Structure formats: C-alpha cells, structure tokens
Image (tube, helix red, strand yellow):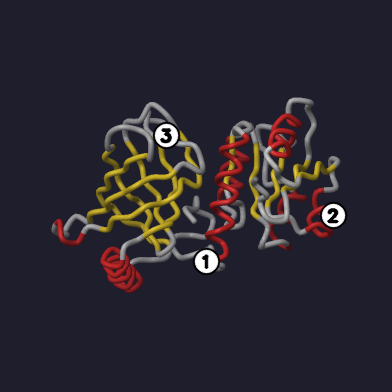
Amino acid sequence: MATAGRGVVFANLRKPIDLRLARELSRAGVQVTVSPVGLAYNECKVLRPTALVYFSANDEKDAEFDPELRRITRDFRNILVYVISSNMTQRLSLLADDHVEAVFSRAPKADHLLTIIERASALRIKDRERSTPRYPVRFKCMIKVVGVPGLVEGEVSQLGRGGFMAHLPQSPNVVPPGDQVRFSILPPEASVDLKIEGDGDIRWGLPTSNGGVQFGVKFTKLPSPSEEKLLQFINKLRITLPVQSTTSVKFG
C-alpha cells in the first residue's frame, strides 16, 4: 500500500471537485491532510509532509507568484511542492522557482500524482542538491516518451549536470510532468561515439507559438560513459559560455 512517506497536504482547495484528488490518494493508502485556505504554511511547519499539492487561487491575467507559496518554497526546501494553476503567466513564474517540483494546468490523475511524488522522493534522497547551473546550447536530440511509440527529433537549448531543456518543433501534445523519457543528445561537432544517452523525468511542458512544445527534463539515469561525456561538455561550457539566468525556466 502506498504511503508517500510523511503524507501529502492539499492546500487552498476552493472547489468541491478539488477534493476528489485528495480522496483518491487517501483511498490509495496515502496519509492526506486538507488544509483550509490561507493555512498551508502553518500545516507545512507542523506536519513537514513529503509533498504539498497547492491549488493556486490567483487567476488574474497578470498573476504573479503566490506570496504564501513563495514563503513555503523558501522555508521548507525538503517538501516536494506541486502546484495546480490555470494561469499561463503564473505557471511561468512558478517554473522559474527551483523548489517547485512540477506545475499542472489542471489536477492530474491520482495514480499519476502518487507515482511522481514517490519517484521524486526517492531521487531527493539520492540528490539533495536539486539546483544546478545550466548553459545555453544548440544540440540535436532524440526523445522517446516511455509507453509511447516512436522517436521524436528536437533541439536541446539548455544543458547542465541536472538535466536539459528541449524544444520539439512539431508535437501535437504537451508531455505531462512526471512522464519518463529516454533521450540521446548529440552536439553538432560530435561523432556517434560522443552521444549522451540516458533516462529522465519530465518536469514541465509548455506549447510554443509555432505549434511545437518545450519542456524540461531532470536526469534520473545516466550510464557511466554518458555521465563522463556530460561532465566533459559541462567543463568546456563553464569556460566558454555564461551560466543561464536563474530566472530562466528550469529543468531540475
């Protein structure tokens, strides 16, 4: 039976339908706490849950990062934070924060949410340092979403030790956060022998104006040869390229 560690707090629920996800996780064996509006910070302080699922209430056109949520991500770095927000501007603001695990435009299915919480919790134990510098690049990549037939060609635009940001010029769907991918990254000057291959988790995904998608991937598995190649590239990039701004969309 799933437990999700110290449990999950659901905060800022304002609609009856929001309770459905909390009830489904509870039936799956997760210790669930539903926090009244405005009390999420106190619940996190007292309970120190494994994860917080935060329903954002600010849907204004110029919405910015929710003040209460910013306090939570600042003060409770060990809590996995998942945000549900229907506002695009706000989602971009949230994605710039290195301590928001993933952002959804609508509530995910309970089994999907539980899977990504447990996977992220396991990764957190292995890697406490989640924020890594990223560098602007233009590398070809091949992406395969686990469980979906076929490969898709795209371009990596940011690369770091923790993961990468990629753009797929033609894709009908935004890959949802939590989905697993297999990838191959090939720098322009590299031969086939210098490919970086491995597995990763989608952290976020957004549509682009030209009909494609961009998304961030956090590395979950890199074979030793690929890890060595990645470190070689990163060492070279550290010397020749500037670090990407911390306000940029993150990959991990």
User: In the image, which is nearer the foreground, mark 3 or mark 2?
Assistant: 2
Who's the residue at 45% across and 65% down the image? 133
The residue that disc 2 covers is: 42
Question: N-terminal of the two: label 1 or label 2?
Answer: 2
What percent of the width, then of the height, locates residue 13? Answer: 78, 35
User: What kind of element bears circle 1?
Assistant: helix
Q: Is 89 left or right of 231, judged from the image as shown? A: right
The dot on residue 197 is none
What percent of the width, then of the height, locates residue 144? Answer: 32, 41
The residue that disc 1 covers is: 126
The residues bearing labels 3 and 2 have C-alpha atoms spaced at a distance of 38 Å
Question: N-terminal of the two: label 3 or label 1?
Answer: 1
Q: Residues within 10 Å of mark 1 (few under 14, many from 20)?
A: few
Q: Is 46 left or right of 72, judged from the image as shown? A: right
What percent of the width, then of the height, locates residue 213? Answer: 40, 36
Type of amino acid at the residue the image marks with label 3:
Thr
The residue that disc 3 covers is: 208
